[in-house]
Amino acid sequence: MIIMLYYEKRKEDLFSSHGHHMIRKPRGTADILPEEAATWQYIEAKAREVACRYGFGEIRVPTFEVTELFSRGVGDTTDVVQKEMYTFTDREGRSLTLRPEGTASVARALIENGRCSDPMPLKLFYIINCFRYEKPQAGRSREFYQFGCEMYGASSPAADANIIAMASAFIRELGIENVTLHINSIGCPECRPAYREALKNYFKEHEAELCDTCRQRLESNPLRILDCKSPVCSEIAKDAPKSIDHLCPDCDAHMKSLTAQLDAMGIDYVIDTNIVRGLDYYTRTVFEFICPVIGAQSTICGGGRYDGLMKELGGPELPGIGFAMGLSRLILAMNECSKTITANNSPELYIAPMGDAAVTKASAICEGLRREGIKAESDLVGRSLKAQMKYADKIGAHYTLILGDSELESGVAQLKDMTNSTQREVRIDEIAAELTK
Ligand code: ATP
Ligand code: MG
């Protein structure tokens, strides 16, 4: 039975109706067809509008970068660099990588384009596709889309509060509810070493119980164990020392000021001591917006402060803070909140021509209308008049106009309003004016 099913599946895979085998998209990628693209367009337009309102300018960076940018900028000990990158050598033997995220590229671009001496803060946003070799599941794919924001040159807690407020506004304005903002502070190079030691000592006591990956992390990056999703490790992590209890006075004051500002802005949050973020360059503030109703991949936005990144990438010492959101997870969250966006590409006018002369006239009228910014369609496939009217109805045309020899001769035709089945006589050459009045 299983063999039969397998054979049927293979057959389907191997032969399309033309006998050539059908090619499928790579695992973990998606086709976005027009009906669904409407939602993506809506989200992207909203992202641009909100980012602009909060004073961010759009930056567009290359889809691939030299691999070293990510090994340095994202961090050698992260899952992203260790197991998730799409790395290849080009024809000249250079190691290149499809971007797994946007932050490192933006930092590189600012350094490379001499923008680090512009008036501060630098405020950039991007909407990009990213690539990570992960196990595809709901809310996790190999090609995915991120809306991200970066602010450089502002180390104040107010900068953190501004960034968080913007992420929060964007999510709210998409109509997504049931989202909780989780924040934490993971300290700075001043206080982190002592915390790291405390963490290491704690996990050392549980070394035998930790998963293989976390046992390795014990030396390389014990903070990451807090992030581990394995049930045993996360159970052990519950009682681990908390970074928030090990902050130096400056980090502590930063966190207190941030929470006071969020309070003043009316932005709710919970302090979540297990949030560490997967990436090495984070300092102080880390945060996530979590929407539990969308399932296991419930983090719709992750962000934080990365004061060490610019320097790491060979730039000046400029503090940075930002976030990135996964667009597909935002869509899942919007769906959960019954927030649906429908594509509307219905024409204002459908012209049904009968005969060659009418086809030519219909094309000319359509083109004229389109140049005026009016959506118009006419027959391109040679349907009968009856089939054309059915088609016009199906595509939701507001008006229809039948063009035959007598209409061409008299220069007048019947403009039918499909919404109420009334019709009126119009001069063919004045149709644009008719439709806009
Ligand atoms: P996760 O814990 O879900 O793997 P992450 O820590 O790897 O997330 P970041 O690198 O901070 O994620 O990326 C920011 C956001 O991008 C995430 O919060 C998520 O919304 C989205 N994202 C990350 N990886 C994927 C993916 N493979 N598919 C879809 N969205 C993703
Ligand atoms: Mg990940």
Image (spheres, rainbow, N blue to C red):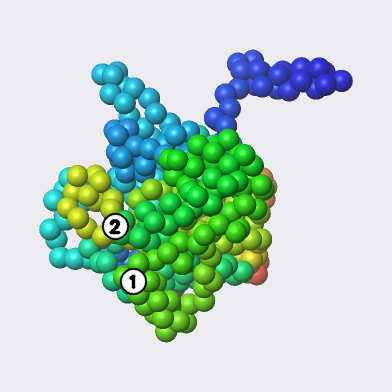
- Residue labelled with disc 2: 307
Above-or-below relation of 418 to 252: above
- Quarter holding the N terminus is top right
Note whether residue 33 is visible. Answer: no
Q: Nearer the viewer, residue 436 or 129?
A: 129
- Residue labelled with disc 1: 249
Q: What residue type is disc 1 on?
A: Pro
Pointer 2 local density, CA inside 10 Å: few below 14, some 14–19, many at least 20: many
Q: Nearer the viewer, residue 387 or 284?
A: 284
Sooner in the amino-acid sequence: mark 2 or mark 1 = 1
Q: CA distance from mark 2 to mark 1?
A: 17 Å
What is the x, y in percent for residue 47?
41, 62
Q: For the point 33% across and 71% down, which residue is it?
A: 249
Pointer 1 local density, CA inside 10 Å: few below 14, some 14–19, many at least 20: few
Mark 2 secondary-structure assignment = loop
Q: For the point 62% across and 39% down, which residue is it?
A: 208
What is the x, y in percent for residue 162?
36, 72
Q: For the point 25% across and 46% down, which residue is it?
A: 312
Q: As drawn, is 387 to the left or to the right of 126? A: right
Q: As drawn, is 234 to the left or to the right of 83? A: right
What is the x, y in percent for residue 423?
60, 67
| Quadrant in which residue 433 is drawn | bottom left
Note whether residue 226 is visible. Answer: yes
| Quadrant in which residue 230 is drawn | top right
What is the x, y in percent for residue 368?
37, 54
Mark 1 secondary-structure assignment = helix
Q: Nearer the viewer, residue 3 or 24?
A: 3
Q: Residue furthest right?
A: 1
